[in-house]
Amino acid sequence: MHNSRMIILQRSARVFFQMLFWIPVAGFSLLLIYNTLPYFSFSKDFDFIEERSFLFKSNFYNTCFYIHIAAGALCIATALVQFSRYVLKKTKWIHRISGKIYVFVVLFLGAPTGLYMSFFAKGSFWERALFLFMATWWFITTLYGFTTIHKKNVLAHKIWMMRSYAMAMTAVTFRVYHIIFYLLDWDHLENYELSLWISVIGNMLFAEWIIYRKSKRYLNSFIT
Amino acid sequence: MKSILYVGITLMLGASIYGFVDYNQTNHRKEFKEMYEPAKMEAPVVEEKKLPVTDERAGIMESKKISAEIETKKGESVAVSVSSKEKQPVKKTKKKKLDYREFSRAPLREFQVVEMKAEEPVKVEKKKAEIKEQ
């Protein structure tokens, strides 16, 4: 009786903490997608575009930008269902289709356009280097995630996809930090640079921490 | 499987080479260098003109309380005291408005809001009716 109560309590606590993580993640992801949609009016009347008006004179940069934001929105939307156990167990075909869309979008659209645009990113040399690294690491992690599942290595697939998703989510976490530092009265450029570094490093560390926790449980299963 | 890999890598290499070449071409252009610099916006200078203060005016300004008697319908007289301050300062504050649209990479705007303090309500003190005997 006591044991069953404890198990129920543990399960409900786990569900609660999962909700505490996934509700803001899903909410902010959907907000990002919602805010991306107006860009497809192809109007130049956006602060982001106005700031880079010189770059937007180039047709190639223009094309890369629109491909990149479409790819970003699509991969964030498709990734939302990928970590659901329910979807994995009950409707595996959804996981497969949205996974294929995610991989295609990242490898062929999101990462290459991001890599090109990173040369012209805001900030100093180091911020541009960080954007270059982000695009490359996003590509590599997604590629590994894809190749490992083809080799039926599910565990490695999970790990690499977590790393890939962490990179994709830098777009979301960056905006959250950006607003927090803005409210703390930080200067715009400092705010931008700091938010960028914290979002990238923070997301990478968070992904590694989750992987470590999961692998610890997996390794412990051999002992008991 | 391999074709996906090759296409992806080719795209990445192409993007990095083209990006590097393009960056080197635009790197030294003035427009590019000044692109991310914050726009220097100078606040408009408003000259505060001081009106010549005449003796009469000074007298009004100095008086902080103006009292008057108003006759009501019933014949009661009501003493009205108005407390006025010399200058009502206009507060200029930078308000940070957050909107769902601010959830972007674009620079966040600060709205300058001019806050006007509402005048204090006129204090009306009712005094007991004093019947004026004429």
Image (cartoon, coloured by chain):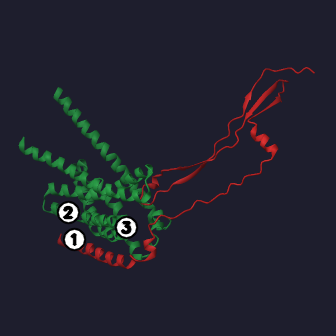
Secondary element under disc 2, as helix, strand or loop, is helix
Circle 3 SS class = loop
Residue B29 x %, y %: 43, 77
Quick check: do tags 2 and 1 share a chain? no
Q: Residue furthest front?
A: B55
The residue labelled by disc 2 is: A146
Which is in the foreground here, disc 1 or disc 3?
3
Q: Are marks 2 and 1 in contact (CB under 8 Å)?
A: yes
Q: Which residue is mark 3?
A: A121
Residue position marked by numbered label 1 in the rendering = B4
Task: From the viewer's side, name the closer residue of A15 and B22.
Answer: B22
Amino acid type indicated by mark 1: Ile
Q: Nearer the viewer, mark 2 or mark 3?
A: 3
| Amino acid type for the residue under numbered disc 2 | Phe
Where residue A40 appears, as percent x and y from the top left, is 44, 65
Considering only vertical position in the picture, is B88 above or below A123?
A: above
Specify the quadrant of the image occupied by residue B66: top right
